[in-house]
Image (cartoon, grey):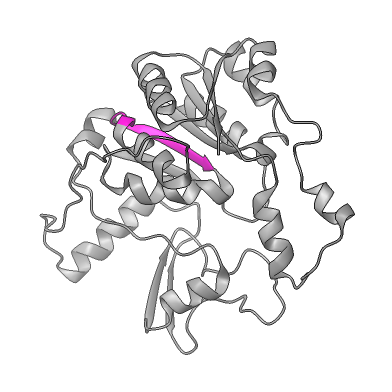
C-alpha cells in the first residue's frame, strides 16, 4: 500500500470553510453536488439567523453511497463513466516554504509542518483555531493523509492518532492537538508510550478554549460575563504539558519560536517512537 501511495499524482484540493455561512457562499454557484461516502454538508451547530443546510437551494444532490462504500472505487467508476482522462493535468507541486523567525503563529506553524512532513505521513487534525493554517500550507507538501473531525465535538484527536498509528505502523503520524481538546482524552498519551507508537503530538497551546470563545459570539452572546469567560480560560492554573507528557513516559519539549519548532520537528521526523512538542502560540 505504501508503494502504491508513492505513485499517486496529487491534485489540488479545496476544503469547505468551517463557518456555515461561508461554506454556503462557497457552494452557492453550484447546480449539482456529487457526494461520495458522506452526507450533504451541514453546519456544525444551529446558529440563530445562519444557515444549517449548506447545499444551494434547487441544486441536484447525487449521493453515491454512505461512509461504508469504497470511495476510491466509486470515484473511479464515475471518472470512467464520464470518460475522464487517465493522466492528471493539474498536479500539486512540492514547495519549500521560507520561514519567518520569531514567535509562532498559525501560518508559520503550517510552514514548518509542510517543510518537515515526510512522505506518506498521516496528519490527525484537531488543531481548532490554529489547525487551518497547517492545512492550507501543506497542500504542496510531500504526499500525505489528512484526518479531521466530522462533527462539532472535540476530544477525538489523540485517540484518532493512536488508531492511525496502530492501523498504519509504517507511516509517521502527526497529531495537531489544541490544548483544550487534548484535556478531554489526555490518557491517550500514555497509550502511545505503552504501545510504542510512532506518533508526534503537537500541542497547540494558546491557553484557552479559543474556538469556544468564537462560538459563544456566534450564538449571539455579545457581552459574556466573567464567569462565562473563566470557563473557557486554561491559564488558572496554566497546564504544564511537557510535565504531563513526561509523567506518562513521553519525551517532550516546549517551543515558543519558529526556529525552535523547526528544530524540534526535524528531530521528531528523523526518529521513530512517541513524543510531544508543546507549541506556544
User: Quick one: quadrant of the C terminus?
Assistant: top right
Residue 182 or 109: which is nearer the viewer? 109
Q: On the image, which quarter does residue 182 sit in?
A: top right
User: In the image shown, does 136 or 85 lie closer to the viewer?
Assistant: 136
Instruction: Please give left or right for residue 127 compared with residue 244 in the image.
Output: left
Residue 215 placement, left or right of 55: right
Front one among 44 and 266: 266
Q: Can residue 235 be seen at all in this image of the molecule?
A: yes
Q: Is residue 164 above or below residue 40?
A: above
Residue 20 in percent (x, y) is at: 56, 71
On the rendered structure, is 155 left or right of 41? right
**Residue extent of the magenta highlight:** 116-126
Asked if residue 209 is among those painted magenta in the image, a careful observer would answer: no
The image shows residue 253 at horizontal and vertical percentages of 54, 18
Residue at the spot 46% in from the left edge and 62% down from the top edge: 65
Q: Could you tell me which residue is drawn at 30 percent across and 34 percent down?
A: 115
Residue 2 placement (x, y as % from top left): 28, 29
Relative to 181, is 224 above or below? below
Amino acid at each position: 500500500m505504501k508503494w502504491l501511495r508513492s505513485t499517486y499524482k496529487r491534485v489540488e484540493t479545496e476544503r469547505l470553510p468551517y463557518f456555515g455561512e461561508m461554506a454556503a457562499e462557497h457552494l452557492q454557484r453550484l447546480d449539482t453536488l456529487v457526494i461520495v461516502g458522506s452526507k450533504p454538508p451541514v453546519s456544525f451547530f444551529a446558529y440563530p439567523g445562519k444557515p444549517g443546510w449548506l447545499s444551494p437551494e434547487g441544486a441536484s444532490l447525487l449521493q453515491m453511497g454512505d461512509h461504508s462504500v469504497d470511495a476510491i472505487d466509486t470515484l473511479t467508476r464515475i471518472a470512467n463513466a464520464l470518460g475522464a482522462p487517465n493522466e492528471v493535468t493539474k498536479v500539486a507541486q512540492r514547495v519549500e516554504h521560507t520561514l519567518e523567525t520569531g514567535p509562532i503563529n498559525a501560518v508559520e506553524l503550517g510552514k514548518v509542518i509542510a517543510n518537515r512532513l515526510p512522505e506518506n505521513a498521516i496528519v490527525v487534525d484537531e488543531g481548532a483555531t490554529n489547525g487551518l493554517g497547517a492545512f492550507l500550507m501543506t497542500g504542496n507538501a510531500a504526499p500525505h493523509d489528512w484526518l479531521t473531525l466530522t462533527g462539532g465535538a472535540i476530544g477525538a484527536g489523540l485517540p484518532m492518532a493512536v488508531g492511525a498509528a496502530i492501523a498504519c505502523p509504517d507511516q509517521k503520524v502527526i497529531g495537531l492537538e489544541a490544548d483544550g481538546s487534548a484535556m478531554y482524552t489526555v490518557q491517550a498519551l500514555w497509550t502511545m508510550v505503552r504501545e510504542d507508537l510512532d506518533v508526534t503530538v503537537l500541542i497547540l497551546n494558546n491557553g484557552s478554549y479559543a474556538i469556544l470563545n468564537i462560538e459563544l459570539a456566534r450564538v449571539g452572546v455579545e457581552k459574556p460575563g466573567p464567569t462565562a469567560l473563566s470557563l473557557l480560560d486554561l491559564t488558572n492554573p496554566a497546564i504544564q504539558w511537557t510535565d504531563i507528557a513526561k509523567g506518562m513516559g513521553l519525551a517532550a519539549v516546549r517551543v515558543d519560536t519558529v526556529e525552535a519548532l523547526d528544530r524540534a520537528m526535524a528531530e521528531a521526523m528523523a526518529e521513530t517512537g512517541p513524543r510531544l512538542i508543546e507549541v506556544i502560540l
